[in-house]
Amino acid sequence: MWDYGLRRRGPLARPGVGIAPHQDTARTWFTLHYGPVPRFRPDRWEFRVFGATAIPGKQSFSLDALRALPNSRLAGDLHCVTKMTWPDNDWGGVLLSTLLDMAPPAGDVTHLMVWAEYGYSANLRLEDVLDGRAILATHNHGRRLEPEHGFPLRLVVPHLYGYKGPKWVRGIEYMTSDRRGFWEERGFHNLGEVRLEQRYSYQEEPGEGPLL
Ligand SMILES: Nc1nc2c(c(=O)[nH]1)N[C@H]1C(S)=C(S)[C@@H](COP(=O)(O)O)O[C@H]1N2
Ligand SMILES: [Mo]
């Protein structure tokens, strides 16, 4: 029994119970991504918020500015759509909702594109990242993220499959309509909700994603 990717502990936590549908629990944290691990270049690094912003124009944040925002923690499993789960994570960082308050979207924004190094992207519905459901993580279980897991910053959205959480994230684009991100264009479900097992784009119902 589970909820938004959060694996239940205690009396219910026995094998096969408490894990999301058709996922297997990994014994060690897997590293999964397309392409090489980018090198962190502090002098060039900035986090951009652009697109349909409430205040016209692009806003940019340094890593220090982001780290200075109120810090939060978010608990959740990391579910790869390929059926592996790395359970019971404790992510530390800045809630995406906190950043959205700092650099608000225009009133007609419905979706975000989250951009990472090398042009990786993931599209998200606004409601999937509000109210503390998504975190720009710098830490896992109190430890700074390793380069292969997204240092210095990655997005984590526990109730969605892992491809919705870009590692090495560099910006957010506010959108007034939906557009597919990297894996969403390559056969994976536009919404990616774990509870509904939305894995592949062929499962999409009308209205769940832009036409392919
Ligand atoms: N930039 C980037 N982020 C990415 C990916 C990627 O290919 N590039 N893969 C995603 C996928 S499919 C998963 S399952 C998780 C895996 O995170 P981990 O390597 O920290 O376990 O990263 C996600 N973030
Ligand atoms: Mo994945």
Image (cartoon, helix red, strand yellow):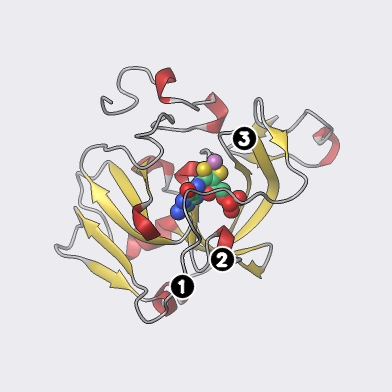
Q: Estimate the x, y position of residue 161 in percent, counting from the top left.
A: 53, 38
Tell me which label, 3 or 1, sits earlier in the chain.
3
123 lies above or below 103 = above
Local secondary structure at mark 2: helix
Residue that lies at the very extreme toward the left in this rendered image: 56
Residue 160 lies left or right of residue 173; in this view the side is right
Between circles 2 and 3, the one closer to the viewer is: 2
Dot placed on the residue nearer the N-terminal end, 1 or 2:
1
Which image quarter is the N terminus in?
A: top right
Using the numbered discs, state the Cα–Cα distance from disc 3 to disc 1 in whole angstroms: 34 Å
Q: Secondary structure at mark 3?
A: strand
Which amino acid does the dot numbered 1 rest on?
Phe
Q: Which residue is mark 2?
A: 147
**Snapshot quadrant of residue 138:** bottom right
> From the viewer's perspective, is the residue at label 3 or at label 1 nearer?
1
Residue 129 marker: none
Estimate how packed mark 2 is, as few (under 14), some (14 to 19) or many (20 or more) residues with alpha carbons within 10 Å.
Answer: some
Q: Mark 2 vs mark 3: which is more N-terminal?
A: 3
Q: Is the C terminus in the top left, top right, bottom left or bottom right quadrant? A: top left
Residue 3 marker: 3
View extreme (bottom): residue: 43
| Residue that appears at 33% across and 66% down | 102
Looking at the image, which residue is at 65% across and 26% down?
21
Up the image or down, 204 lies above or below 181; here it is above
| Mark 2 in CB contact with mark 3 (< 8 angstroms) | no
- Which amino acid type corresponds to the residue marked 2 in the rendered image? Pro
Between the residue at mark 2 and the residue at mark 3, the CA separation in whole angstroms equals: 29 Å
Q: Which residue is mark 1?
A: 40
- Label 1: how many residues lie within 10 Å, few (<14), some (14-19) or many (20+)? some
Rendering coords of residue 109 (x, y %) = 23, 45
Q: Would residue 123 appear left or right of 56 to someone viewing this image? A: right
